Image (tube, helix red, strand yellow):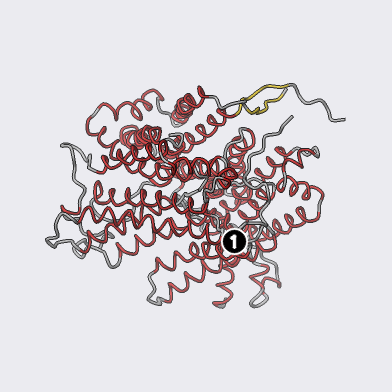
Amino acid sequence: MQLVLEKRAERSTFIALASPVLAIALTLVTMSVFFLILGKNPVTALYVYFIEPLTDSYTLMEIAVKASPLVMIAIGLSLCYLANVWNIGAEGQFLIGAVTGSYLAVVTNGTDAGYWVLPAMLVMGALGGALWAMIPALCKTRFGANEILVSLMLVYVADLILDYLVRGPWRDPKGMNFPTTASFDPVATVPVIMEGGRLHAGVILTVLVVIAAAIMLGRSIKGFEIRVVGAAPRAARFAGFSSEKLVIFTFAVSGALAGLAGIIEVAGPVGVLQPGISPGYGFTAIIVAFLGRLNPLGILVAGLFLALTFIGGEGAQISMKVPLDLTKVFQGILLFYVLACDSLILYRIRLVAAKPKAA
Amino acid sequence: MGLVEAIIISIIAASTPLLLAAAGELVVERSGVLNLGVEGMMIMGAACGFAGAWLTGSTFVGALFGIAAGMALSFVFAVLTLGLAVNQVAAGLALTILGVGLSGLIGAGFVGEKIVPAPQLYLPVLTGIPLVGRILFGQDGFVYVSIALVAGIWWFLCRTRGGLILRAVGDNHTSAHALGYPVLKIRLFAVLFGGGCAGLAGAFLPLAYTPFFIPGMTAGRGWIALALVVFSSWLPGRLVAGAYLFGAVSILQLHAQAFGLGIPSQLMTALPYLATVIVLVIISRAHGGHGSVAPASLGTVFVPDR
């Protein structure tokens, strides 16, 4: 007897809906095992991770603040992945967006620049991210270089550029030699929209991006083109869709969104440009994109869920002395389960008798 | 010991983890599987390798722990991509994310601990030869293993029936299946082998390179190893040249920083990553942008028909 995969006649709609739920359930079971190994009560730990953050208005706002960059980046990545374009350097595009956007905040710091500063910063951030993403896109379309490796290498380079700027030319002269720019002026700061927390206007932008992506994917030719090139490249060529142009387009959009998320993060919750502004948003967003089934609304839900694991993980670290890296482990395991469960949409697992010996 | 000799020895040390990891991945890719989780398997190899050496006091046991950790992670990858036909790119990314997290968890207790670094070969007379003695006869075991590994892989791939079958599976899995070769089983062994190599490469870092463990100490070496496989055009011989070229870049930039040429240190640190991008562009361009030398079935899912 052995287990074999068998292609389904058509994709299973039921499993398509049930698979993220199943993946999360399996992750929770695995987490419980981890907590038992660490000598913690799994019920209490899961409560601290997933329920406690939902019982307090401050942590609720924090979840939205954390989910905002994750969702914004993941929307861009989902366009890439749907088109079978593998941008995994969103972390670098996020950092470069933060850098190019911060440029205006740094040069206008302490001057009486008007309210144009913040909108201009957001535009610069998006442009910076898009330009940074153009490097792997052009390397792929012009020279056929693998976009996965190029986009990933540029993450390290982006990190070093940011590091150079905040330790060198952009360092706050009054900052006691800490590697950070001066605090941004109020006109260079994303306004907080609710009292008693850090919920900022960037969250509204993220929601708008989700809506725009849903309309584009569901209702526009471009969205159709992305799906066709990704699912059936041969058919796409017959239809006259250029896969090269689509590589440029998806990289540009995802780079711009990651860059925008980057500048919103520094001009919002962080307030200065400094190293370590991202706890790996660009990589966690990959999980968000897949958990959300590359669907804008799914990504919104998935982003909120992963933000919850970040906030819950911080809570568990403080109250239960659980290592913070545990959150990353769970996020990795979650992605595994999501991918495994998604496989069941197209295939079914069957138990068959062992093959008769070949003659 | 002269400066040139010291630089060459440090270049060999910097190249060895790249060579080990890339050699394993080369076999994996020759069988038609793209495992992007090298970085995750390497960092797990580093954490478990250090743990093993710290607990037992033996570099050898540490290396075995590293290999086992890499193989364990690659087995998870194999279950997903071979057993469940999951997209290999996504599963490889998941493997890296998981490996980085798990290594932080395992290694947390070992940060700040020290071990005795791997012993170096010492042959009377031979090691004492001026200039070349230490370079040829005074390295640690990892260096000799890495060279032997590449030679063994070359011999296996190019000179044995098993190697021919593995390449056939990587170039056309449908035909190989039709001929009766167990495609998935061959790929499973290749993936496990690659995982073991990546684990050993990771273990080299805390066991021989620096005698302590730091979270994230692989610093993208796993990704550079993946780029090296492309650089080598999937040929073991060129892999050695590529790995030593990259080792040289990463060591020479350190020396350039020490000279203080007025170039920002961050730019010098970025050099190996920038060099990777440039090399990828040049190599891809040389192959007409189609990657025509890549194994034809690389990265594609195979579900056997019956």
Instruction: Give the x, y percent position of residue A242.
Output: 52, 51
For this orientation, the residue located farthest to the left is A112
Q: Residue at x 74, y 55 (%)?
A: B152
Is residue A188 positioned above or below B97 on the image?
Answer: below
Residue B261 appears in the figure: yes
Instruction: Report the front residue among B11 and B53.
Output: B11
| Amino acid found under the numbered disc labelled 1 | Ser
Q: Which quadrant does the N terminus of chain B fall into?
A: bottom right
Q: Which quadrant does the C terminus of chain B fall into?
A: top right
Q: Residues within 10 Å of mark 1 (few under 14, many from 20)?
A: many
Give the left or right position of residue B49, taking residue A18 as reference. Answer: right
Give the left or right position of residue B66, taking residue A273 as reference. Answer: right
Give the left or right position of residue B303, taking residue B216 as reference. Answer: right
Instruction: Give the x, y percent position of residue A206.
Output: 31, 41
Q: Residue at x 40, y 54 (%)?
A: A92
For this orientation, the residue located farthest to the right is A359
